[in-house]
């Protein structure tokens, strides 16, 4: 019955698959320590929730414009101008049901079959999936711990070719926590200035989650000459803990924004009116909590780094933002589990953590890299501390080739 060839061009998100597995195992009674979820464990702030309640009580429950109401766009416009130094007319702002559909529509609007889009790896799986869904080809620039998980100007310059139509930047990055500073963005911009036919998609969703006093920079503000071919995408899910409210927004060139509206007109509906009221309260209201939560994430990052430092066979970069770590497990490749199975990849290691230690992480192949795995610090300090201890014990058990250090799940105490 299903005959479309498009399904053969891309894979379902591995993160969605892991989420489903976790839900199934918990339903079956397994107690899991889940470090896979890219979702804040904080609640949506009270003043934002209250705005949604007021909208319900006022009866604001009807259809809304496909690209967001005027009041929401005004708030987005102010946010871009005040926080990012980007000044868009209202006609060049579009909102969507989360940032993800906006990103997908943006890629579909730019790419024709066979066109190329450049992105660094490890990458968010959906960035690559969106390229493939648009029948484009992802040009993957490999990065790693030694390069800070950032593409360089030299890499970008070598990668741009006659079919290049798009470059995707994500900073702070999912899954690595890498943050491009102003000088690094300026170097990339110099390459892009020499290629006027290449558009830039800047995914800024983790803008407010930064560590060690770092400042956020976005490429259209760093290099104004790229303003007219950059779509800057943001949203409220991560920093504002509004994942369920589904609000994303973007500003960019009029023809690109109009194309997104055209795609939306046949593939989406208007944003939830109640969510829009909450989004306006978020964008226009107090923001002190953003710095407080970023500081909490930094504490958690440091806890995770300290714990992973005790894990033999792992190597970890120091994330500069977002709420993920991307450890490398090359030192464990070739070791054997107590059951005799060989660890041949990060997928094998993640399977070992889940089956023998009840710890959930996301293996690297889903992010186009190996042997890395992603873990999230968007959880309590107590959960993180226990998780890092379990991972360290699991690594030690492999290094000792299944010796006395290994414990079966029934012997893992809550004090681990």
Image: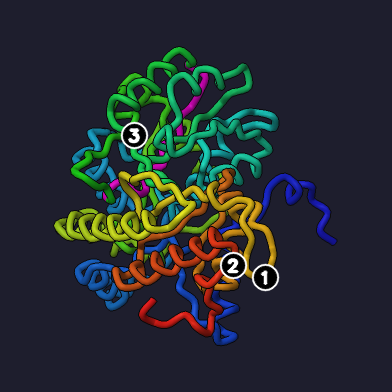
- Front residue of 335/226: it is 335
| Membership of 357 in magenta stretch | no
Which x, y percent locates residue 372? Answer: 53, 49
- Secondary structure category for the residue under label 3: loop
Residue wearing tag 3: 180
**Classed neighbour count for the residue bearing mark 3: other residues with Cα under 10 Å, few (<14), some (14–19), many (≥20):** many
Q: Nearer the viewer, mark 1 or mark 3?
A: 1
- Please say whether residue 381 is visible from this viewpoint: yes
Which circle's residue, 1 or 2, is located before the other in the chain?
Answer: 1
Which x, y percent locates residue 299? Answer: 24, 59
Residue wearing tag 2: 402
Residue name at image x 26 percent, y 49 percent: 208
| Membership of 203 in magenta stretch | yes
Q: Nearer the viewer, mark 1 or mark 2?
A: 2
Q: Tell me the tag on residue 9.
A: none
The quarter holding residue 311 reads: bottom left
Disc 2/disc 3 C-alpha distance (Å): 41 Å
Residue wearing tag 1: 339
Q: Nearer the viewer, mark 2 or mark 3?
A: 2
| Image side of residue 104 versus residue 223, left or right | right
Residue stretch in magenta: 196-208
């Amino acid at each position: 019955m299903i005959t479309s060839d498009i399904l053969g061009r891309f894979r379902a998100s591995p993160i969605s698959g892991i989420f489903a597995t976790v839900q199934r195992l918990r339903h079956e009674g397994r107690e899991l320590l889940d470090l896979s979820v890219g979702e804040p464990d904080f609640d949506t702030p009270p003043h934002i929730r209250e705005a949604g309640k007021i909208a319900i009580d006022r009866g604001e429950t009807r259809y809304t414009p496909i690209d967001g109401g005027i009041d929401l766009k005004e708030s987005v416009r102010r946010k871009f101008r005040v926080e990012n130094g980007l000044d868009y007319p209202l006609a060049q702002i579009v909102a969507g049901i989360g940032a993800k559909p906006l990103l997908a529509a943006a890629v579909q609007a730019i790419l024709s079959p066979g066109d190329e889009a450049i992105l660094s790896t490890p990458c968010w799986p959906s960035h690559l999936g969106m390229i493939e869904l648009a029948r484009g080809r992802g040009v993957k620039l490999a990065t790693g711990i030694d390069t800070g998980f950032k593409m360089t100007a030299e890499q970008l310059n070598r990668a741009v070719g006659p079919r290049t139509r798009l470059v995707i930047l994500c900073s702070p990055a999912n899954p690595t926590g890498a943050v491009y500073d102003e000088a690094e963005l300026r170097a990339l911009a110099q390459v892009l200035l020499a290629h006027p036919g290449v558009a830039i998609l800047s995914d800024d969703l983790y803008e407010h989650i930064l560590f060690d006093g770092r400042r956020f920079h976005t490429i259209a503000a760093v290099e104004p000459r790229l303003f007219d071919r950059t779509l800057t995408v943001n949203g409220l899910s991560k920093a504002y803990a509004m994942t369920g409210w589904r609000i994303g927004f973007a500003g960019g060139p009029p023809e690109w924004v109009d194309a997104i509206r055209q795609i939306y007109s046949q593939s989406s509906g208007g944003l939830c009116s109640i969510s829009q009221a909450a989004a306006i309260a978020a964008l226009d209201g107090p923001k002190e909590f953003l710095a407080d939560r970023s500081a909490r994430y930094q504490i958690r990052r440091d806890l995770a780094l300290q714990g992973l430092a005790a894990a033999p066979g792992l190597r970890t970069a120091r994330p500069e933002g977002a709420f993920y770590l991307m450890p490398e497990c090359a030192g464990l490749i070739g070791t054997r589990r107590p059951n005799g199975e060989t660890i041949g990849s990060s997928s094998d290691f993640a399977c070992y953590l889940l089956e023998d230690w009840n710890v959930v992480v996301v293996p690297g192949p889903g992010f186009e890299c190996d042997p890395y795995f992603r873990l999230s610090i968007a959880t309590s300090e107590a959960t993180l501390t226990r998780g890092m201890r379990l991972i360290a014990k699991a690594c030690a058990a492999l290094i000792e080739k299944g010796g006395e250090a290994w414990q079966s799940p029934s012997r893992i105490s809550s004090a681990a």
